[in-house]
Amino acid sequence: MKPTTAQYYKQKMLKVLNYIQDNLDAPLELRELANVACFSPYHFHRMFKGMMGESLKEHIRRLRMERAAWRLRHSTHSVISIAHDASYASDVAFSRAFKRLCGLSPARYREDSTAPFPHLSPTAIRYSETEQLKEFEFFHSTEMMMNVVIKEVAPMEVAYVRHVGPYIECGTAWEKLCTHLAPLGLLGGQAKMVGLSHDDPDVTPAEKIRYDACITLDEDFSPTEEVGVKTIAGGEYAVTTHFGPYEKLSETYAQLCGEWLLTCGRTAANQPCFEVYLNDPESTAPEDLVTDIYLPLEGLTS
Amino acid sequence: MTDKVDLFKQNRADYIAPKTPQSLYVGAAHYLTIEGHGAPNGEAFQESLEALYGMAYTIKMTRKRDGKGDYTICKLEARWWHADGVDLTDIPQHQWHWQLLIRTPGNVQSIDLEQAARALVSKGKSELVKTVSLSQLEEGDCIQLLHTGPYEDEGYSIEILTKYAQEIGAKPNGCHHEIYISDPRRVPPERLKTILRQPVAMT
């Protein structure tokens, strides 16, 4: 790992981690957290998952839970108020979640002072009432088997249909786009199928996730009410290939934006990633699907 | 909403192929096809492939927009021959002739093809799309097997198929036909699955 890149990201991540710990009672929105350390909001959630080994949402939930455990042991707050502070609406839901984490109900945990403090972090970062984090180790998966190439990509003009809702329903956007473009002769040749995701499915509610189904254009096309036109920025991109079902794309994204980015000596540019679908999900078994993932890189400095 | 037609699944019997050869009867089937000659990794082959797929998706999506039903684009198939009927393994690849095929529902009509080709050419796509045509093929008695491995190693599987033909007293009666089950971009060569089919006449 090149120390400079890793140090750069570590300093930024430390700010976020300490901010989270200090503000567990706040809603902790993705954008706000990305701002804390000047991370690009486009990549922050994936970087977090790749670098920390758990998603932002999992991290926040876990810390709130650990704080709850700490308060059960060291305070006299009622279980229901502790549950509320951990963002649980009822003590039943809290009890169930706590038991899953700790193996004991909150009441038993409070009574039994020898019960161990739950810690399930992949990075040894735990809740502390008094301490600030100064240093930590990035998460390393056991199998970092990723081939990444860096490509210079020309700006791409695309026709697109925006889908707002769960990813599994984005087929309707594709259908709209393809049935619109096909009769115009815009589906053949080198036309690429590109997907642009604007949100983190882990943080954004499913019904609000924005996804653009895009097809590259090499001829003029006038946008309509349903089908827009825009340009995907050119520049240098880190490209890796994801093999298998689309449901597992987020794992490859996390590895690219986390572990790989830490080792490459480059930083991510403030633009969204995109993915290029290389086969037809209708006639291809999910495990045989091939998708290229493109992560935009900041221009080289000095 | 009408159900999507998947010809590959509906005609499963045509695509069953064990490692050892088996006999089967292949009834009439409709295809979108394009013909050419040259090596399979050559430019002409790649351009034809692109033209065929461009047509296949343009036709499918245009018909879908027009409410004429939806179907899945089937696996790529190809038939191979030499102009003089020489055994392909004996001549260089650039002399190979081929017909690329994608199985297509019978209600796709030549007017669909004309419309699609016009649209594609109007947007500057290769004129090759105009050479894509509809074919009906009824191969009848066939023998086939599943070849697993690189395309270059097909010779051995073809030998097995030829030997089997002799055993059952059949002789070739049509072009060598391949059905590409695997995607060569995804699958390493040693795991590529390809059905090798030979139409035969019983003697």
Image (cartoon, coloured by chain):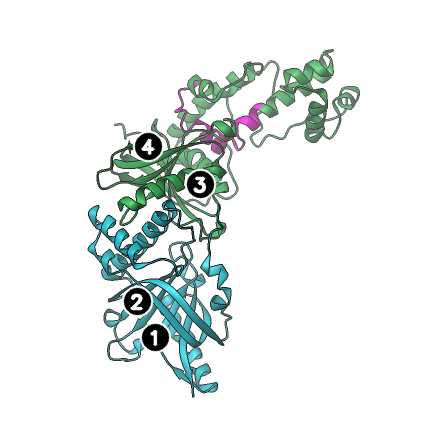
> Label 1's element?
loop
Q: Nearer the viewer, mark 4 or mark 2?
A: 2
Mark yes or no: residue A176 visible: yes
For disc 1, the marked residue is B175
- Label 1 is placed on what type of residue? Cys
Cβ atoms at labels 2 and 1 below 8 Å apart: yes
Q: Relative to the observer, which residue lies in front, B128 or A152?
A: B128
- Label 2 is placed on what type of residue? Gln
Question: Chain coloured green: which letter?
Answer: A
Q: Measure the alpha-carbon separation of dots 4 and 3.
A: 29 Å
Query: Which residues are the magenta region?
Result: A37-60
> Label 4's element?
loop
Cβ atoms at labels 4 and 2 below 8 Å apart: no
> Label 3's element?
helix
What's the chain of the residue with tag 2? B
For disc 4, the marked residue is A297
Q: Measure the alpha-carbon separation of dots 2 and 3.
A: 32 Å
